[in-house]
Amino acid sequence: MPPLDPQVRPQREDYWGHVNPIGSRSCYDEGKRCAETLFFDYWRQHGLPIKVARIFNTYGPRMHPNDGRVVSNFIVQALKGEPITVYGSGAQTRSFCYVSDMIDGLVKLMASRDDFTGPVNLGNPEEIAILELAKRVISLTGSKSEIVFEPLPDDDPVQRQPDIKLATGTLSWKPAVQLEEGLRTTIEYFRRTIVE
Ligand code: UDP
């Protein structure tokens, strides 16, 4: 396993992470870690009520078509008949949560008792390889796009999957929208909004 990959799977809240502090992606990774640190300092020093959610890959209608994330990229490419750009071999996995499930989790977290600070994972544990996601999008759109392989960005995690036992136990929350259903709704959204 390369040195930057999560060392436990699925990832629980008490896992402290294993990220490169000086890589091209580090401002993103470390920015989130630093934000958690500051939140907990405010909570300890000033008694500020805080809630820390760890959001895993989320998708759905109203994503920006050029936002660069994988679900929007693949759907836009498929609908335009452009090549689907899989980075690396596509064997890396992600776990995709539909936006309405994520919002529901966030609302439940905000309404939780004051002494529940998190961090709490919010995400859908259903894991899929990126190459498989590309094939699903092609099949659901009926696209004639071909899959092309491009270089894997630096520090791209090989696997990401939330353990959501804390959220299910404490917030009585779990995702309800299956990937296929969420992809269909997202595809319909992009069909309506993409200007050829
Ligand atoms: N990815 C891809 N093609 C794209 C965009 C992303 O293969 O056009 C891959 C990317 O390398 C990563 C995964 O899809 O392995 C998820 O990427 P995203 O940027 O959506 O989320 P994150 O890497 O932050 O989990």
Image (cartoon, rainbow, N blue to C red):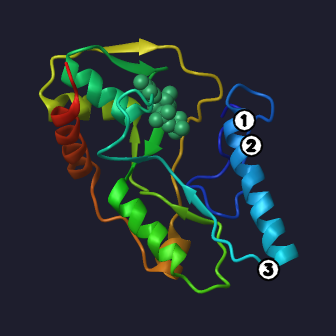
Image-based side of 182 in relation to 91, left or right = left
Question: Decide: marks 1, 2 in contact (CB < 8 A)?
Answer: yes
How far apart in space, not on screen, are marks 3 and 2 (Cα)?
24 Å
Identified by mark 3, the residue type is Gly
Mark 2 sits on what residue? 30
Which sits earlier in the primary sequence, circle 3 or circle 2?
2
Measuring 21% from the left and 28% from the top, which residue is drawn there?
A: 138
Q: Residues within 10 Å of mark 1 (few under 14, many from 20)?
A: some
Which is more toward the observer, 21 or 192? 192
Mark 1 sits on what residue? 27
How far apart in space, not on screen, are marks 1 and 3 (Cα)?
28 Å
The local secondary structure at tag 3 comes to: loop
Q: Residues within 10 Å of mark 3 (few under 14, many from 20)?
A: few
Image quadrant in which the C terminus is located:
top left
**Can you give x and y, in whole percent of width and height, for residue 181 in the image?**
21, 51
Image-based side of 152 in relation to 103, left or right = right
Which is more toward the observer, 3 or 143? 143
Considering every residue shown, the one lying at the far left of the view is: 142
- Any atom of ligand 1 within 8 Å of the CB at mark 2? no
Identified by mark 1, the residue type is Cys
Mark 3 sits on what residue? 47
The local secondary structure at tag 1 comes to: helix
How far apart in space, not on screen, are marks 1 and 2 (Cα)?
5 Å
